[in-house]
Each structure stands twice: as structure tokens, then as C-alpha cells.
Image (cartoon, grey):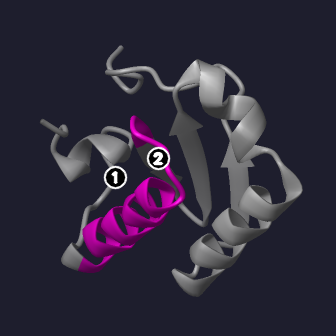
Amino acid sequence: QAACLASRFPYGTEITREALAKVERIEDRLRDLGFRQVRARCHGDLVRIEVDKPDVERAAAPDVRDALVQAARREGFRFVTLDLMGFRSGVFNP
């Protein structure tokens, strides 16, 4: 079961329905591209993409990378990053 979408935001961040929907749409796009374990972590106008560590290289491939950038831009993000450490649960927990 996927964690609550609110866990995609740093503590203290105001979370809106619109922001949650953006995260959900980007994560849906990642799953459409064949990734199983995904997170789209929001940091203001930056979205940080996490996929399973073995999938990081595939996520960085030009065609996949371009699809992710397009999806993030459609959602209003200015910057898109791929977390090279891969998916980690509870990354915002101190």
C-alpha cells in the first residue's frame, strides 16, 4: 500500500489538494512508464523523483527522462531531479 501523499512534502510545508493531485499525477506517470516503487517529493518548484535503485539508470535514459520532465512541467514544476540514491521510505523523517 502506498504511503499517504502528504509524506511527499517536507515537514512544515502547507499542503493543498492541488499539490497532492500534482504528486499523484506524476507518480501515475512513473507507473505508466513501468516503474513499480516511486515517489515524487516536492520541494517548492522542484520535484525530486525517486525510483528503486536498480531503476535509476533507466529513469535517466533520454526518452524516459524527457517524459518525466514533460510530466513535471505540465504540473507546474520548474525543476526536475532524479534522486541517485533511489527510493527510500521515510526520507523526510528526522
Q: Please identify, in this view, whether the residue under mark 1 or under mark 2 is nearer the observer.
A: 2
The picture places residue 60, in percent across and down from the top left corner, at 79, 44
Which residue is drawn at the image coordinates 19% and 40% (left, top)? 2
Which residue is drawn at the image coordinates 68% and 77% (left, top)? 70
The majority secondary structure of the magenta stretch comes to: helix
The picture places residue 26, in percent across and down from the top left corner, at 45, 65
Mark 2 residue element: strand
> Where's the C terminus, which quadrant?
top left
Q: Quadrant of residue 56?
A: top right
Q: Quadrant of residue 90?
A: top left
Tell me, yes or no, whether the highlighted magenta stretch contains residue 56. Answer: no
Which residue is drawn at the image coordinates 52% and 26% (left, top)? 52
The picture places residue 55, in percent across and down from the top left corner, at 63, 31
Residue in front for this viewpoint, 45 or 28: 28
Q: Quadrant of residue 8?
A: top left
Residue in front for this viewpoint, 31 or 50: 31
Q: Is residue 56 above or below residue 53?
A: below
Residue 41: which numbered mark, if any? Answer: 2
> Where's the N terminus, which quadrant?
top left
Mark 1 residue element: loop
Find the magenta span and give its range.
18-38
Q: Amino acid at mark 1?
A: Thr
> Do residues under tags 1 and 2 come within 8 Å of each other at their CB atoms?
no
- Mark 1–mark 2 Cα distance, whole angstroms, equals 12 Å
The picture places residue 39, in percent across and down from the top left corner, at 42, 43
